[in-house]
Image (cartoon, rainbow, N blue to C red):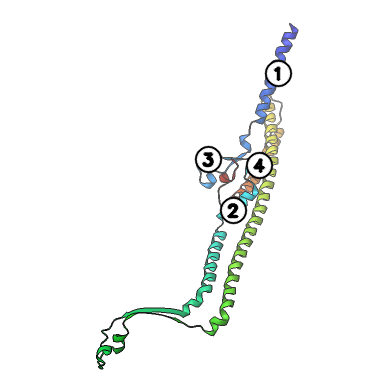
Amino acid sequence: MMVKHLVISLFFLLIILFHSVCLAQRPNSRNRVSFGQSVGIVNDSTFLDVDQDIAVQLMPFDDLVKMAVSYSPLIKYQNEVTNSLGSARDLSKVQILQNASGFANYSGGNQSLVTTSLLQKGDQLGQIANGYRFGVDFRVSLYDLFGRKHQIKQATANYRASEIQKDIIEQQIRRELITIYQDMITAQQILKLRLTDEQAALAALRIVEAENQKGRATSEAISTATNRYIESKVVTEQVKGEFLKNVHQFESLVGVPIQRMKRF
């Protein structure tokens, strides 16, 4: 009989232990931060979990850099500048053709000068030169002769400089992303610690309140526990604000909301 009761007790103990583990593994809503309303998404269910590393929740950093480059207005502007300088380079190669011109016309006559050999008024040359006429006029100045290659070199150098400037902008974007990304990770780690401290202060306050209901807590103990919780809550909100600021700066630099950066 005692063995039977022991088995039943162990069974219920295992159930309670399993239930406690499940509760411990369940995500805490207090440690999740929503960014839906901040970017204009009203019915948003996407959260950043403070307890989970940012690097795990978001896309790989190199993919985020590529996304930031593709959405960067500076890169878009530089692309247009590069296209313009590329067209200027191509134009400089064919600019010498502006000194060439062609013509074509048609003349018809009655050949009266040939048949009668009499002088007549009018277009005497047109009467014997009837038919189509084509021609090309090409003139090259000394500037085109000696300065054209330097003009092409200048246009090519401007085009290459524009491409290099694009690479410089991409490097600047990557450096800024690294800085803000690291600041965001640091703020997240600090927020995790502050949330733990806040929960500990709240638990201490609940214990004091329970003791007060039993008449075993002093007003000084209640005041101390309350002040401790309020101070912890204020610090938590400050750190949370710093974390949110870093996230919004990261969103602005990448060019998309944080929801689009998450892993799927």
The local crowd at label 3, few if under 14, some if 14 to 19, many if 20 or more residues have their Cα within 10 Å, is: few
Of callouts 4 and 3, which one flags the residue occurring earlier in the amino acid sequence? 3
Q: Which residue is mark 3?
A: 44
- Dividing the picture into quadrants, the one containing residue 171 is bottom right
Q: Which residue is mark 4?
A: 56
Q: For the residues marked 4 and 2, what is the alpha-carbon distance in whole angstroms?
A: 19 Å
The local crowd at label 2, few if under 14, some if 14 to 19, many if 20 or more residues have their Cα within 10 Å, is: many
Q: For the residues marked 4 and 3, what is the alpha-carbon distance in whole angstroms?
A: 21 Å
Q: For the residues marked 2 and 3, what is the alpha-carbon distance in whole angstroms?
A: 23 Å
- Secondary structure under badge 2? helix
Whether label 2 touches label 3, CB < 8 Å: no
Q: Which residue is mark 2?
A: 68
Discs 1/2, front: 2
Q: For the residues marked 1 and 3, what is the alpha-carbon distance in whole angstroms?
A: 40 Å
Q: Residue at x 72, y 10 (%)?
A: 5
- Quadrant housing the C terminus: top right
Residue 123: x %, y % from top left: 28, 88
Whether label 4 touches label 2, CB < 8 Å: no
Question: Which residue is more in the foreground, 68 or 123?
Answer: 123
Discs 4/1, front: 4
Of callouts 4 and 2, which one flags the residue occurring earlier in the amino acid sequence? 4
Of callouts 4 and 1, which one flags the residue occurring earlier in the amino acid sequence? 1
Furthest-right residue in this view: 2
Discs 2/3, front: 2
Q: Mark 1: which amino acid?
A: Leu
Residue 100: x %, y % from top left: 46, 79
